[in-house]
Amino acid sequence: MIDHTGIGVADASRSAAFYDQALGALGLRRVMQMPDNLGSDGVGYGVDHPMFWIDRYHPHSVRQHTAFAARSRAEVDAFHAAALKAGGSENGPPGLRRPRYYAAFVLDPDGNNIEAVFRGD
């Protein structure tokens, strides 16, 4: 099992503005932040504890893929709309990819492929 994971970003403050909106649509929020003199070094998102980190400690030139579980198709749609509004780039609109796999894909400010998926009817 995975307790937490994360990706490197070039500018944690800029990326946090994107993830605040995109992950907020999935019910996740900032639960921890590591500040520095310039704003932030890293931000952890989750419900009770950080399960997804963005930080400037890890390489940010490596494009990653992370999929977040959604509780409904409407939540996938909300994630997609919020991520685009926050400055993300379209990488696959909401839709049924295969039976019981409704997903949407957006590139974050660093080009990471971020997905929301609902595995239900």
Image (cartoon, helix red, strand yellow):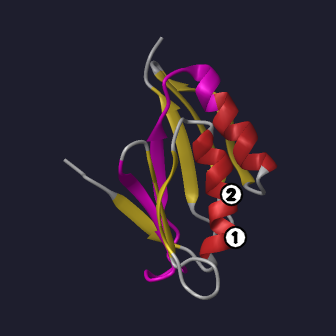
Q: Amino acid at mark 1?
A: Arg
Q: Say left or right for 105 vs 8.
A: right
Secondary structure at numbered mark 2: helix
> Quick one: label 1, few (<14), some, or many (20+) residues within 10 Å?
some
Query: Which residue occupies the extreme top position in the image?
Result: 121
Quadrant assignment, res 104: top right
Percent across and percent down for residue 49 are 35, 50
Which span is picked out in magenta? Answer: 49-76
Q: Is residue 76 above or below residue 80?
A: above
> Quick one: label 2, few (<14), some, or many (20+) residues within 10 Å?
many
**Residue drawn at (62%, 37%) of the image:** 25
**Residue drawn at (44%, 83%) of the image:** 57
Number of numbered callouts drawn: 2
Query: Pointer 1: what residue?
Result: 14
**Residue drawn at (46%, 45%) of the image:** 67
Residue 46 lies within the magenta run: no
Secondary structure at numbered mark 1: helix
Q: Amino acid at mark 2?
A: Phe
Q: Mark 2–mark 1 contact, CB under 8 Å?
A: yes
**Residue drawn at (31%, 56%) of the image:** 4
Q: Say left or right for 7 vs 74.
A: left
**Alpha carbon of mark 2 to alpha carbon of mark 1: how far?**
7 Å
Percent across and percent down for residue 59 are 47, 82
Percent across and percent down for residue 115 are 54, 45
Query: Which residue occupies the extreme bottom position in the image?
Result: 37
Residue 59 lies within the magenta run: yes
Query: Pointer 2: what residue?
Result: 18
